[in-house]
Amino acid sequence: MPAWAKTWNDRWHDFKRHLGILKHMSPSRAFNLAVNLTCAFFRTRKVPGFPYVLRLDPTNVCNFSCSLCPTGRRNYGRPPGLMPWNTYKKAVDQLSPWIIRIWYYIWGEPLLHPELPRMIAYAVKRGLSTNLSSNFSRMTPELAKDLINSGLEYIIASIDGADEKTYHKYRQGGSFQDVIQNLKMFLDVRRGMRSQTPFVEFQCLMTADTENQVDAITSFALDLGVDRVRFMPLAVPFFPYRGQDVSQYADWFPKKPETYRYQYEPGKPANPGHCFWLYEGLTLNPDGGVSPCCRSYFKNEDFGNILEEPIRTIFNNEKFQRSRSLFSSYPHTNGEKNVCDGCKEFLQTAKS
């Protein structure tokens, strides 16, 4: 299971971030959230409502070749491309009365999408919380101003290290000096515009290389002027949802048991709880395909497409219902098996 050895500082930041959604709440969103959480608690197959988080990929293309990322390895799960404006608008228009937050990142580098600031501004005008993660290689002063003016609420700078050697071992194709200069520039622009947003998080994966540099990385990032430094567990390609052997990646794993890490144990789920993704969120790909969660990568695993069906229909179709039933205490529903049947991330409790 994940060893989330969070510090109190981490917990406090997470609490404040989640508390911040209250300013985005409306009667319809509050009602939908209550319905959704109730269904998740009782693990119902159907959800008489909508997801409350939208996670979308503006593009599944990236300019880096990160060591453990399938996109970086150019192992595309679907044809590479940009999300068309009409696809994005269709999703937001259907969901904005109900969802609270949009995450603009999954498998690609979102700053490669030329309409990203416009996409964010469209959501902000509808009262939604907006969150972005980037490798910061394509940040420019003009783009920084556009993102800040869009109303973006939270941005993550994914920078795995405090020196070129550590950074480049994972972030292949990037320049440590360039991304640090871009991050400094972004902070300077925000300061010059006298804006409190977006909140800037410096994020680092916990690996065998970074686990002994936590204090150095933290000090380095805070000296830059970021609002938060966060270390995240290292996830390897397609595990745990595929249950693949991870021994080939052992050199990447942190060695200290107290550090943030996933405990990979063959035959055991990474998380002893039930899957919350099937209730909480909708994962939208650039081509309009809906994945069951952000772990699912391949087009043939999609549960539907918003260009063909309304989101509410997809959210309660046979695939979603079967997948939710895997985590109930009752026999799972009939229907064709899908990617969730083989998932090893959460504990499946359904009777066969």
Image (cartoon, rainbow, N blue to C red):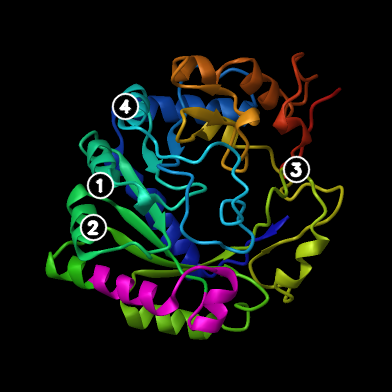
Q: Is residue 352 left or right of residue 92?
A: right
The amino acid type, in three-letter code, at marker 4 is Asn
Q: Amino acid at mark 2?
A: Leu
Q: Local crowd at mark 4 within 10 Å, few (<14), some, or many (≥20)? A: few
Asked whether the residues under the numbered discs 2 and 1 touch, taking CB atoms below 8 Å apart as contact, a structural biologist would say yes
- Residue occupied by mark 2: 143
- The residue tagged 1 is 117
Chain-order first, disc 2 or disc 1: 1
User: Distance from label 2 to label 3 (Cα)?
Assistant: 38 Å
Q: Of the residues under marks 2 and 3, which one precedes in the sequence?
A: 2
Q: Quadrant of residue 317?
A: top right
Report crowding for label 1: few under 14, some 14 to 19, many 20 or more residues within 10 A (C-alpha): many
Report the disc number at residue 255: none
Q: Which residue is mark 4?
A: 86
Judge by depth and name the residue closer to the eye, 19 or 66.
66
Between the residue at mark 3 and the residue at mark 4, the CA separation in whole angstroms equals 33 Å
Residue holding disc 3: 242
